[in-house]
Amino acid sequence: MVKKLTFGDSSSNLRFQYCFFSRDEHHIFTIQNPLRDGNSYLTSWDLNNNLEPVKTIKLHNHAITATCMNTEGTFMGLGTVDGGSKVVNTRYVEVDCQDFAHDLIVKSVSFINDSRHLASVSADYTFYFLPNVRPEGWFSKITKMWVAAMIVIWFAMFINNQLGLF
């Protein structure tokens, strides 16, 4: 099947640079770079719905120069023309973390085996390991506090039963 991928009026100023299939094979992800100066974008396309765009996000103010996908298909690693490294969560189609550790263009990116770090290599002969950590939400914090409180209560009850202090 051949299909021309277009979205909105801005597609004439962009070129489709990279393409990845999702792990479940229901979506494809494309990265569109500007022809000259401009923003780069990531679009998720639904393969089951006549290749309609599901979500498009702005990735960066400049072109994306290097990409990779982790083995599970849950994260996409990106390198930028101005020395940045980014990790995109493909489940939510959003940037999880980023850093600008290089002075020149990022030439290659790759995930470490467990996907906890994104390695990037630059034209300035440097390499960098970007920790792949998603910001912690309020639900996670509340859950951790609840578990800690339950452990303290259980420990107090255990001491009370053993020593009969309370």
Image (tube, helix red, strand yellow):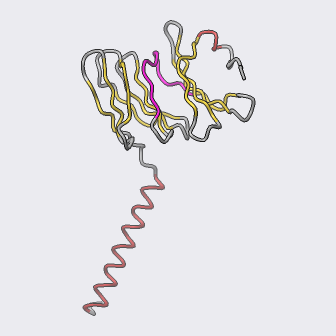
Can you say which quadrant of the picture contains the C terminus? bottom left
Residue 50 occupies which quadrant of the picture? Answer: top right
**Residue 134 painted magenta:** no
Report whether 150 appears left or right of 7. left
Closer to us: 17 or 145 = 17
The quarter of the picture where the N terminus appears is: top right
Residue at 51% in and 17% down: 39
Q: Residue at x 39, y 73 (%)?
A: 150
Most extreme residue toward the top is 36
Residue 152 placement (x, y as % from top left):
33, 74
Residue 114 vs 104, above or below: the answer is below
The dominant secondary structure in magenta is strand
Q: Quadrant of residue 5?
A: top right
Residue drawn at the location 43% of the way across and 33% of the way down: 87
Where residue 104 sits: x, y (%)? 31, 15
* Horizontal side, residue 47 vs residue 138: left or right: right
In screen coordinates, is 74 left or right of 163? right
Task: Residue at the far front: name it.
Answer: 1
Q: Nearer the viewer, residue 104 or 1?
A: 1
Instruction: Name which quarter of the figure residue 134 lies in.
Output: top left
Task: Name, please, the residue furthest toward the right.
Answer: 50
Q: What x and y, as percent, mark residue 123?
A: 30, 15
Region rendered in magenta? 57-69
* Residue 61: in magenta span: yes
- Relative depth, front residue between 126 and 137: 126
Point out the residue furthest to the bottom here: 164
Percent position of residue 20, x then y: 55, 29
